[in-house]
Structures are given as structure tokens and as C-alpha cells.
Image (tube, coloured by chain):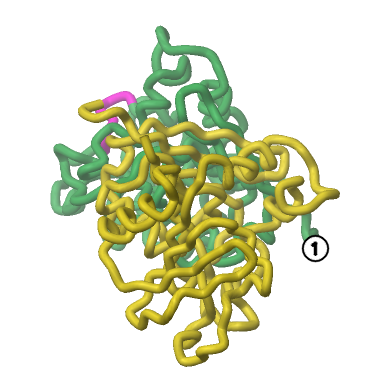
Chain colours: A green, B yellow
Amino acid sequence: MSQTRVHNFALSLDGFATGEPQSLEAPFGHAGHRLHEWFFATRQFSADGAHGIDDAFAQRWAPGIGAEIMGANKFGPPGWQDDLGWRGWWGERPPFGTPVFVLTHRPRPPLELDGTTFHFLSASPDEVLAAARDAGGGLDVRIGGGPSVVRDFLLADLIDHLHVVQVPILLGRGVRLWDGLEGLEERFAVEATTSPSGVTHLVFNRKVHGG
Amino acid sequence: MSQTRVHNFALSLDGFATGEPQSLEAPFGHAGHRLHEWFFATRQFSADGAHGIDDAFAQRWAPGIGAEIMGANKFGPPGWQDDLGWRGWWGERPPFGTPVFVLTHRPRPPLELDGTTFHFLSASPDEVLAAARDAGGGLDVRIGGGPSVVRDFLLADLIDHLHVVQVPILLGRGVRLWDGLEGLEERFAVEATTSPSGVTHLVFNRKVHGG
């Protein structure tokens, strides 16, 4: 059974998944790299990174995934839709290796880059999930962010597994993940694990129906 | 050297220290008891409670404390100032056993109850802290909450030790602790510890000056 999964989704202690303002030079605004330093230190990110609890979680990003869904803000800086030459943040070798569905109100033709095909569409969570499942051959679908896309899928009760990484910093401003999700924990089993790096891994596993 | 400490301060994952609305029947609003179930299960709270990581943290509430400072909302439900007979939530045997300074814009004469003396005053964080240190004989001062009082003391950089307990629930609404505290972590060493009960203990220890 194909699951919908979120991995390595970093939040500040005050709940922000990105700082502000987002731009070409600062994709996470004033947060800079601070939400992702734990990830840069893993073997998943770099050959001289460390094995350990952070890496164990980070490695789960790819296996079993047949497609990713992402929001427009993850594909490019504000206004990328005006630049027909924009090919994503990742250069000519994006790390996905699967179909990627980019939610945008200004669709454009698909873009193929080294085994990753980006599809651009305007659709509801239900609709894009159906398209991603189909394109992914029935494997799991990863919701890649940003925060408003993850939130939309949580609100629609379409997430089976959510891995959040709480980083002990206070950003004070930016885009929050948790807004409007009162009572979310009732639908999930929640487990917390701290790491020597200082972050806390939180996993939300959806309870089997009625649970 | 007298320190200023916060203990056992529970927060939901989305950062709320209390739900809403607060009333005589529901001191934490729609949060009910959910933020404090971890505490009710400790030996610190009850003779048939458990020893363990939650209890180890909870026990640190009293030793070395000479006085407490609390906000008006911790002393009583909204409007308690209109009731001259209101003697706090705790009945005739409050658990403090030290002077307690209650911040309120409507001071009243001190109230003595079984070894606890409540003082009622309108004062800045600096002023009330000086009064509490003096009354506590130079021992440590506990900031007892609620969230807006703890936040005021953090903003004034008057907290040496902050123990926050993150409970894996999403309240969605209420009073947040972290608002306006961008960059707080720069002044503190932060440590996170998870518990089998599901909560995560976060301790913020103020760095020695210049750190």
C-alpha cells in the first residue's frame, strides 16, 4: 500500500520551517543554513559525514519513494515563474531521480534533468497525490515541502508518516508548520528521539483507521 | 550567587503554555490536564508516582529556591482581583513554603497561608526580582509563570535556567511562550532529553557572560 511520507523536515523551536524573506541568495531567509546543519553533517549528505542517529533518519528519505510533490517555493525563489530558463535550485543533476510534481498556479511544460522529471501543475492535494502515485508506479510518495504544502496535506489527512527535526534555535519569524492543526496528535502515534547533535527527531506515524 | 530559574514549564509542540479560555473551572482552558499528565505521574507530585527522568527533572523545582514570582493569571482565574476572599488555587496549604510575589496591577495586602506568604505588587521584572531576592535571603528565585511572565523575564535577560517540557500535542490556540524571542539560543546552552512518557525536556542554561 503506497504511503505518503515527509522526511527531514526541519523546524525551529518556535515552529518555523523557514525564515524570511526568501530570495535567490537566501532560500531560507534569515534562517540561513541553521535549520539544516544537522543534515550537512550526515553521511546521507556528504561522503565524509557521520553515521549516527541523524544519518539513520536522513537515509530514510529515498528508499521506497516513487515520486515527490513540492510547493512552488521549494522549486525556486519568488518570481521564478517569470523566468522560463529557471531549472530549479539543484543544477543539472537534481537529487530526486523520480517524477517530481511542482504545485504552481502557472503550469509550464515538463522538464527532464538527469533522471528527474519535473511536472508543473495546479491541483488539490487529492488530485496531485493521485497523479504522483500513478507516476511513481504505486511506490510511496514524498511530500517535499515547504511548510504550507505539508500543512495542506496534514489538514487533508493525507500524510501517513511525518518526520520533523526540531532544531534548538528560535527564528522569531518566517513560515510556521503547525498553524491550524489542533488535535493532530490524535491521528498519530508520536515518538521523540534526541541526538548528540542537539536536534530532536519527532516521528508521527498515522494510526491504523479508527485507532 | 542567586539564580533565576524556571522549572517544569510545559508547552505543546506548537508552543502554547496554556489553552483558552482560562476560567475557574478550566485554569488551562481547552488544554485541560494534557500539558501536565507527565508531571502527575511523578513521585514529586504523588507518593505512588514513578521515579525516572520526568521525576528527576520535576524534583528540581524546590531545592535552593527562596522565593517565587508569578503572574496574576497563575494566582487565580480572570477577575479574581474583584473577590477579596480569593486565596489562590491551592487551598489552605499552598505548596510553595516561601514568599511568593504575585504581579498584579491591583495590589492588596499580603496573605499568609501555612508558611507561604503571598505579596501582591505592580512592578517591572527588575524591581520584583530585587524584592524576591531580598525576601528569599539570597537563595534562587523561581519564575513560576504563566507564559507572558516567563517571556517578560527572558526578554529582560533575567533568566539563568529555563526548563521547558515539550508535550507532543498540538493545542492550536492559547498563549505562546516563544513569541518575540528570536535568537534566544545565543545566550544559552541548550540540552534536550526525551522521556519514555513521550515528553522532551529542554534545558536552557545561560552562558557565562560573553559566552
Image coordinates for residue B196, horizontal then vertical, percent: 72, 38
Image position of B10 with respect to B19: above or below = above
Secondary structure character of the magenta stretch overall: loop
Tell me the residue at 35%/27% (across/down): A37
**Residue A89 is inside the magenta segment:** yes
Question: Where B115 sits versus A89, above or below?
Answer: below
Magenta stretch: includes residue B138: no
Q: Nearer the viewer, residue A209 or B190?
A: B190
Note whether residue B97 is visible. Answer: yes
Looking at the picture, which amino acid does disc 1 mark? Gly
Return the residue found at the far right: B48
Residue hosting label 1:
A210
Disc tally is 1
Chain ID at mark 1: A
The answer to which of A19 and A68 lies nearer the viewer is: A19
The residue positioned 25% from the left and 26% from the top of the image is B211
Locate residue A140, reporting x and y percent: 61, 41
From the top left corner, tell me how far across and down residue B52 is, in percent: 73, 36
Q: Quadrant of the N terminus of chain B?
A: top left
Q: In the rendered structure, which segment of residues is drawn in magenta? A: A88-93
Q: Is residue B97 left or right of residue B180?
A: right
Label 1 CA crowd tier, 10 Å (few <14, some 14–19, many 20+): few
What secondary structure is marked by label 1? loop
Vertical comparison of A107 with A138: above or below: below
Where residue B157 sits in the image (x, y, percent)?
27, 47
Q: Compare residues A152 and B51 and report the one nearer the observer.
A: B51
Residue A5 seen in render: no
Q: Residue furthest top?
A: A48
Measuring 28% from the left and 68% from the top, which residue is drawn there? B123
